[in-house]
């Protein structure tokens, strides 16, 4: 899942600024392409005039959001129940950038402000040598050129029948490898062969892994994974240990693996229609699928004002970011005229994909796809009628190229409505009884990101009953490694002859910055347990059926485990407002049972050292706003090449054990899936999905979707008829009105 971006999916804008900065409609609007160009130019001038840095390349350049209360005041959103919004103040637009010194490899962080009709540098700070900003799409593409042009790589490829022009690779972050100095910006290259244009290169994995220095643009080492053999007492590894060998030349590295070279499988395993037809002359597509169209003859039900959206009482801001992809902010619900805040910001904060094969160098396959590369930077330009169906509104995205110009992805965020089944229904079963069926409409805000072999589809769903869902879909091509003939694969599956796909996990950290009826919120943990001290036959539980919900307010910063036996759940509440009937605090419940997944690597493993956020299903901490914004990144701001979790990370924050009751808090939810590959996942994996939900709990007076009208769809007709009779009836019209 390291990224290999496709240049065809984005448009690179490299022109100088030709128009002035436009007035923005919302304080959280992302930097425009012209702002990126102007801000990067200001940084270049500053570097040339006031530093000894000779040449730079930009890694990131993003909006630095204003403080939370200032944004809410600007938008007229109250910070507590029944209160008036705070008085608005002047907002100074700011940006933050990470960049590299091309000569020395040093990293710098800078903050800018827009004053006097121009961007000005406020701070210019050197980042510690052991910390590295994100790996860019340009670096990943350059890695392939470096590997392909290396003489040793060419020689090794030729030994297994691969020509230089057939060498391809996915550039991954190094993961964890303490053989290399921490200050060196190194990548590992997973190498494949491609025999014709657009062919599925993952069908031809090679048996060695080069290491490159991204700054010096050279191959600095090559690893050869050992192999497994059948033995009388089970399996044995050709190398004496799964540990990494000392750095050496390629011949010595191969000798350490104690195996022969492995030729890549040559069979074509394609997924593009024309290539599948070439591979198999008898191949044909199914011809029994009838067209299915999504139509909205009167147009869509949502409204857009720049990046701000309104739909079915919901109102929110939608932003593109280089790291998170989609960020949703200032989410409110119009409850019969009262604007009620629910979430200040919602996004994917981090993810990690640890692989299970222990033999070196496979443990380095430990991809932080968000923190190391950035979901936004790897996002697709979406296609109407393909990625998104129906009547679609798109938002563009922009991030910075190495040279300071903006890279623009035109249709990066897709917004549309879709039917989602029944919203609610009831039938009075008695003779002459009536029924009512109301169909559920949902709003979808989506993005698709390609991280080399894998695709992630991010769907944020909003429902008419006040619920929110983040659905994560996984597809694409499995990460694979070559296998010898008859080689056992104890940590993976042979999905095709000679192609071994290792077991792995996908673990996601979802950041929720809540403002449920205001900023002073708390988290309540609920365990569903049998009635204590009340056995069957007792006075209080004679039938033995009683169970209760035991609620505990989390008072200090902490991480909490999911407990399946107790049906553990959490909700975010505001105890300054109670429901008129339940007498419970207004709140939103977090639904994550289907995605609760523990990391299977050991607690002291390389993976766990770097990704401490996976140790708990839920974390709660105080939000602390500083000169560079709020607490954001659960594994730290600078993730590439880390060897342990930094103090400025989720696990470090909760060590403070600050009060989180009736405070401005952050909630991080960890969900995931464990993937034991199947042959049916090859050559392209059918979609897997998981989700996190947020549902109102004593927040509304009653079901807020009771005012959604039933709709009798005149386009719905019987599928079949026989001799004039149908297997459907129009009498159902009465149930939807």
Image: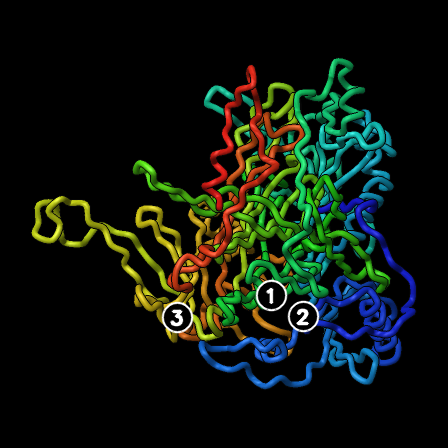
Label 1 close to label 2 by CB (< 8 Å):
yes
- State the mark number for residue 515: none
Comes first in the chain, label 3 or label 1: 1
Q: Is residue 177 visible?
A: no
Question: Up-down: is 322 above or below 544?
Answer: below
Q: Secondary structure at mark 3?
A: loop
Question: Up-down: is 322 above or below 714?
Answer: below
- Residue under label 1: 329
Tally the marks.
3
Q: CA distance from mark 3 to mark 2?
A: 30 Å
Around disc 3, counting alpha carbons within 10 Å, would you say few (fewer than 14), some (14 to 19), or many (20 or more)?
some
- Residue under label 3: 556
Comes first in the chain, label 3 or label 2: 2
Q: Secondary structure at mark 2?
A: loop
- Image position of 483 (left or right of 562): right
Quarter of the N terminus within the rendering:
top right
The image quadrant that residue 618 belongs to is bottom left
- Image position of 130 (left or right of 509): right
Query: Where does residue 393 sit, x and y in percent of width and height?
Result: 72, 53
- Depth check: give the residue in front, 254 or 554: 554
Determine the residue positioned at 70% across, 45% down.
450
Q: CA distance from mark 3 to mark 1?
A: 26 Å
Question: Up-down: is 29 above or below 612?
Answer: below
- Depth check: give the residue in front, 88 or 294: 294
- State the mark number for residue 28: 2
């Amino acid at each position: 899942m390291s990224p290999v971006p496709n240049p065809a999916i984005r448009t690179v804008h490299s022109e100088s600024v030709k128009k002035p900065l436009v007035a923005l409609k919302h304080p959280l609007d992302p930097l425009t392409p012209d702002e990126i160009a102007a801000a990067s130019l200001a940084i270049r001038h500053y570097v040339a005039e006031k530093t000894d840095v000779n040449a730079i390349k930009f890694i990131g350049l993003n909006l630095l959001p204003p403080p939370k209360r200032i944004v809410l005041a600007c938008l007229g959103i109250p910070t507590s129940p029944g209160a008036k919004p705070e008085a608005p103040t002047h907002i100074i637009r700011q940006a933050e950038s990470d960049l590299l010194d091309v000569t020395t490899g040093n990293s710098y962080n800078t903050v800018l402000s827009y004053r006097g009709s121009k961007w000005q540098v406020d701070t210019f700070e050197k980042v510690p040598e052991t910390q590295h900003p994100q790996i860019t799409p340009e670096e990943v593409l350059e890695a392939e050129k470096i590997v392909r042009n290396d003489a040793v790589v060419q020689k090794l490829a030729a030994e297994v029948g691969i020509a230089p022009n057939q060498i391809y690779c996915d550039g991954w972050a190094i993961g964890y490898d303490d053989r290399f100095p921490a200050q060196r910006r190194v990548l590992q290259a997973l190498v494949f062969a491609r025999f014709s244009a657009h062919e599925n290169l993952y069908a031809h994995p090679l048996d060695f892994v080069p290491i490159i220095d991204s700054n010096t643009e050279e191959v600095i080492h090559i690893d050869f994974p050992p192999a497994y053999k059948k033995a009388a007492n089970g399996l044995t590894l050709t190398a004496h240990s799964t540990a990494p060998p000392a750095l050496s030349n390629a011949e010595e590295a191969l000798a350490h693996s104690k195996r022969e070279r492995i030729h890549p499988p040559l069979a074509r395993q394609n997924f593009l229609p024309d290539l599948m037809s070439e591979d198999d002359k008898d191949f044909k597509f199914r011809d029994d699928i009838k067209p299915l169209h999504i139509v909205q003859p009167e147009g869509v039900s949502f409204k857009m004002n720049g990046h701000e959206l309104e739909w079915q009482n919901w109102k929110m801001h939608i932003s593109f970011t280089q790291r998170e992809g989609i960020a949703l902010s200032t989410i409110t619900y119009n409850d019969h005229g009262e604007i009620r805040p629910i979430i200040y910001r919602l996004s994917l904060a981090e993810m990690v994909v640890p692989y299970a094969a222990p033999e070196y160098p496979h443990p380095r396959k430990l991809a932080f796809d968000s923190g190391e590369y950035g979901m936004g930077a790897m996002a697709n330009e979406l296609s109407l009628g393909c990625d998104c169906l129906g009547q679609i509104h798109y938002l563009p995205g922009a991030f910075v190229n190495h040279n300071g110009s903006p890279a623009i992805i035109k249709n990066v965020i897709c917004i549309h409505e879709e039917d989602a089944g029944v919203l609610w229904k009831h039938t009075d079963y008695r003779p002459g009884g009536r029924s009512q069926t109301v169909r559920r409409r949902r709003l979808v805000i989506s993005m698709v990101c390609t991280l080399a072999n894998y695709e992630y589809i991010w769907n944020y769903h909003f429902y008419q009953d006040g619920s929110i869902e983040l659905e994560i879909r996984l597809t694409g091509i499995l990460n694979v490694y070559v296998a010898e003939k008859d080689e056992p694969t104890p940590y993976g599956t042979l999905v095709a002859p000679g192609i071994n796909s290792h077991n792995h996990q996908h673990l996601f950290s979802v950041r929720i910055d809540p403002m449920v009826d205001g900023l002073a919120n708390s988290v309540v943990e609920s365990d569903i347990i049998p009635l204590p001290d009340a056995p069957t036959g007792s006075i209080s539980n004679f039938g033995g059926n009683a169970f209760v919900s035991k609620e505990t307010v989390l008072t200090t910063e902490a991480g909490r485990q999911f407990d399946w036996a107790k049906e553990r759940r959490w909700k975010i509440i505001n105890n300054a407002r109670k429901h008129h009937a339940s007498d419970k605090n207004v709140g939103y419940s977090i639904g994550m049972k289907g995605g609760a997944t523990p990391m299977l690597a050991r607690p002291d493993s390389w993976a766990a050292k770097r990704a401490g956020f996976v140790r708990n299903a839920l974390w709660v901490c105080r939000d602390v706003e500083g000169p560079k914004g709020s607490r954001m990144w659960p594994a730290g701001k600078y993730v590439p090449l880390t060897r342990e979790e930094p103090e400025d990370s989720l696990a470090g924050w909760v060590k403070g054990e600050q009060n989180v009751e009736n405070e401005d808090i952050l909630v991080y939810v960890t969900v995931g899936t464990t993937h034991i590959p199947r042959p049916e996942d090859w050559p392209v994996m059918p979609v897997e999905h998981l989700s996190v939900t947020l549902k109102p709990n004593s927040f509304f007076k009653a079901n807020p979707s009771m005012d959604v009208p039933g709709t009798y769809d005149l386009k719905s007709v019987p599928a079949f008829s026989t001799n004039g009779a149908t297997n459907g009836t129009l009498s159902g019209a009465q149930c939807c009105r």
